[in-house]
Amino acid sequence: MIIKIGRPDPAIALAQGRAAASMPRLDFAKLALREGWITAAEAKDWVPGNALPQIVTDIIAQHIEGADKQEIAEINALGQMVVNRNDLLLRLLMAVEKVTPEQMDAHFGIAG
């Protein structure tokens, strides 16, 4: 019996890379500051988990219905020590800031 092993499907490899990619909140805060998505004051408050950047609270308010669900989303966002590439809030940030998937992949070190 001969088993032929082919090259992995690039789309599957990209999806797996995105699913596995993350970066520490500190690094993402510096990235967000450099890109102009948040201010320096917001970054300084967000890194230790004291407050969320305005863009994050705006996204939560616009896309999550119900005050109790919004509060839980904010608590979850404050508690995350890492930012995951496939996180819903990150995907919404990308839409608001018009960041392409390829651009965000580059920030997370994902080769396309």
Image (cartoon, rainbow, N blue to C red):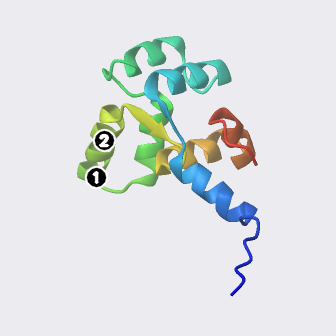
Q: Nearer the viewer, mark 1 or mark 2?
A: 2
Instruction: Specify the farthest residue to the front.
Output: 1
Quadrant assignment, res 52: top left
The residue that disc 2 covers is 76
The residue that disc 1 covers is 69
| Residue 60 percent across, percent down from the top left | 42, 45
Q: Amino acid at mark 1?
A: Lys
Compute the Cα span from label 1 to label 2: 10 Å
Neighbor class of circle 2 (other Cα within 10 Å; few <14, some 14-19, many 20+) is: few
| Residue 34 percent across, percent down from the top left | 65, 18
Quadrant assignment, res 77: top left
Q: How many marks?
A: 2
Regarding mark 1 in the picture, which secondary structure is present there? helix
**Vertical placement of 77 versus 17: above or below?**
above
Q: Nearer the viewer, residue 44 or 70?
A: 44
51 horizontally vs 27: left or right? left
**Vertical placement of 40 versus 82: above or below?**
above
| Residue 5 percent across, percent down from the top left | 72, 71
Q: Amino acid at mark 2?
A: Asn
Q: Residue at x 36, y 57 (%)?
A: 65
